[in-house]
Amino acid sequence: IQDEIRQVPKIEKQQVPIQRVVEREVQIPQVQIIDEIVQVPVQREVQVPMVVKVQKVVDIPQVEIVEQDVYVPVQKHRHVPMVSVAQKFVDIPQVEFVDRVVHVPVQKEVQVPMISKQQKFVD
């Protein structure tokens, strides 16, 4: 039996899908674009001065105290009486004058003509 076995190619049928173009209406949602203006802060570079502390070396002069003995002659003190003049404040009573206006009648001299009667004797 084995001598009779032959190899024969096998033919298989396959179904291959074919793509077809079909037109149909589809509703597509519309996209609305809204622009929004946003203020963006402006950034500037500013140079900031920097304070630097520098140590300065200062020469401090040294003070040297030299003590010397000095002879001071001894002086004698005598008490001398001294006259001093002192001011003394004294309270003096003040006299106050009060003026008063008094009305004094003024007398005027007026010349009044004087009439004298004389008798004449007629002869």
Image: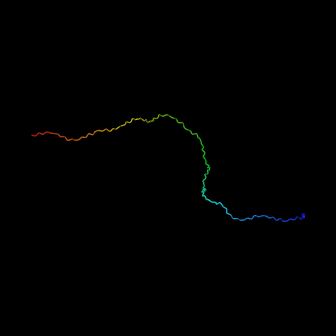
| Total numbered badges shown on the rendered structure | 0
Quadrant where the C terminus is found in the figure: top left
* Observer-nearest of 28 and 84: 28
Height in image: 96 above or below 11? above
* Observer-nearest of 38 and 34: 34
Residue 27 shown left or right of residue 71 in the figure: right
Residue 35 shown left or right of residue 5 in the figure: left
Q: Quadrant of residue 39?
A: bottom right
Q: Tell me how the rendering is colored.
A: rainbow
Height in image: 83 above or below 40? above
Give how far across and how far down residue 93 sits, in percent. Answer: 39, 35
Give how far across and how far down residue 58 sits, in percent. Answer: 61, 48
Q: Quadrant of residue 23?
A: bottom right
* Observer-nearest of 74 and 42: 42
Quadrant where the N terminus is found in the figure: bottom right
Give how far across and how far down residue 70 sits, in percent. Answer: 57, 39
Give how far across and how far down residue 54 sits, in percent. Answer: 62, 50
Residue 55 shown left or right of residue 83 in the figure: right
Height in image: 7 above or below 109? below
> In the displayed image of the protein, which residue is found farthest to the left?
123
